[in-house]
Amino acid sequence: MEGLRTDLEPFFRPKSISIMGVSTGSYRFGGMSFLHKLQECGYTGRLYPINPKATEIRGVRAYPTLSSLPELPDLVMVCVPAPAVLDALRECSRVGARYIHVLTSGFKELGTEEGRRLEEEIASFCRETGLLVIGPNCMGPYCPDARLTPWGAIPGLAGPVGVISQSGTITQRITEYLCSLGMGISKAVSFGNGTVLDALDYLEFMATDDTIRVIAMYLESVTDPRRFLRLALRINPKKPIVLWRGGESDAGARAAVSHTGSLSGSRHLWEAFFRQTGVTRVESMDELVDAVLGFALLPPFLGKGVFLVGGGGGNSVVNGDVCTREGLQVPPLSSATLKKLREIVPAVGSIAGNPLDHWRAYEDPGHLTRVLDLGYEDPAISVIVVDRVIRRSSFHMPDEPDSTPVVIELMERIGQRKPTVFTVDFSGGDPDLTLQGCSLMVRLCRARFPTFPTLQRASRTLTSLQRYHEAARRQDSGAG
């Protein structure tokens, strides 16, 4: 398929949803929990639970069959046991329902002949009828703007990120993690076994969606590597793809087979894929979220020169080492910049250079912005990292109001003439320090300034972004 797929929008913006297999007993995972969460997240469309033995469930009128509904639902969620899924799909086809999410598990991921047979029957039937199916064995679609958030962050936060994942748990965690930092999701999909629609169908769709600027993926396998290569080469230069691949180790590969029935493929082939496409490779949840924040919030930059703004002589030494190890450079500032810097940085107790050891930058927001202006003007500097200290008595800090709101206000006023990120160190296990550090990081992220709990994570993210933008520049130059 050379044209990008554009027909999956109804999955994410249904005006009516029917749930097949809603129990009438106590709350439990499945049709009942999805109905409950759709109500909880404020879904404004019409809900039609299907149960032939009930007339009402959770205050919503229930129906015995799809054909008894007063309208054709835009989306059907199938939550019946695995042996009954094919019959449910037959009923969908009879009434004309085309967009279907199969939550049910119990197929090829079991590793049994019966599970594989049931899944192949589903695949064959959908090929014949043209049904579009997410799943089976998955959490399905997610779209905060449409209040379609029956899992993950509820009701979630709309934003510029698209998420494609084989794992429901990981998709849930990504949406929660990003939402807590103020970064919203445009659309997310947990697709499980990918029997009918697979990761590449969603990738094609999100490539055409103007509300999505960054695509985050968690994959355990790809059914068509050549197609993935073509798509990534086409999409990634215009819309960054951040990929976390599960199943790299022997233990992970074995778990992937049991999870979604997937074979993860050769490590060497994946290495070649990343080299050829320039797709940003991450290896943990933290790395994925860090990269998404960077791509979504920072303007493009090409150089590796970083200006480190903080305090503490020892910090200056080790921070320079960290940046260098992660692929950045900490260049000397120009003579003009140093001259201006020495006019505002005292010779005693500070180091006027790069890294900058200057405690006043922690305490005086106006002074910090003057320092940043010098970094923005210096030709050797491409990006700035500002350390923020959590106020505590061990640092002999005066008992004064937190300056963070003023810092944010001034930063918004002067603008990011060069990409600027923050670090907040709250490591060590002190509960109060952790609580304050998390709060400070969240406040800065929600103000649209990417903030990281360690300089290593900040540096690794900036290196990934710099490589991406440099590759895009080379491609544009070659095309021109």
Image: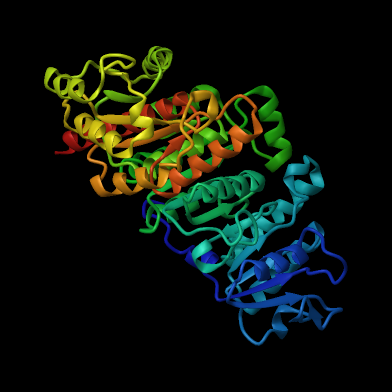
Q: From the viewer's perspective, tell me whether residue 317 is left or right of residue 480.
A: right
Q: Which of the pair 188/203 is nearer the observer?
A: 188
- Examine the rendered structure and indicate whether residue 402 appears above or below residue 278: below
Q: Residue at x 26, y 49 (%)?
A: 413
Q: Residue at x 54, y 36 (%)?
A: 437
Q: From the viewer's perspective, tell me whether residue 28 is left or right of residue 138.
A: right
Q: Which of the pair 124/49 is nearer the observer?
A: 49
Instruction: Return the residue found at the far bottom.
Output: 70
Q: Is residue 48 visible?
A: yes
Instruction: Return the residue found at the far front.
Output: 399
Where residue 112 sits, quadrant-wise, is top right
Q: Residue at x 71, y 52 (%)?
A: 119
- Examine the rendered structure and indicate whether residue 166 appears above or below residue 291: below
Q: Position of residue 385 (x, y in %)?
A: 35, 30
Q: How is the image coloured?
A: rainbow
Q: Which of the pair 409/438 is nearer the observer?
A: 409
Q: Which of the pair 315/288 is nearer the observer?
A: 315
Q: From the viewer's perspective, tell me whether residue 58 is left or right of residue 386.
A: right
Q: In the picture, which quadrant includes the C terminus?
A: top left
Q: Position of residue 26 (x, y in %)?
A: 87, 66
Where residue 478 sits, quadrant-wise, is top left
Q: Residue at x 23, y 26 (%)?
A: 381
Q: Position of residue 143 (x, y in %)?
A: 53, 61
Q: From the viewer's perspective, tell me whether residue 345 is left or right of residue 193.
A: left
Where residue 432 sits, quadrant-wise, is top right
Q: Is residue 222 visible?
A: no
- Examine the rendered structure and indicate whether residue 345 appears above or below residue 257: above
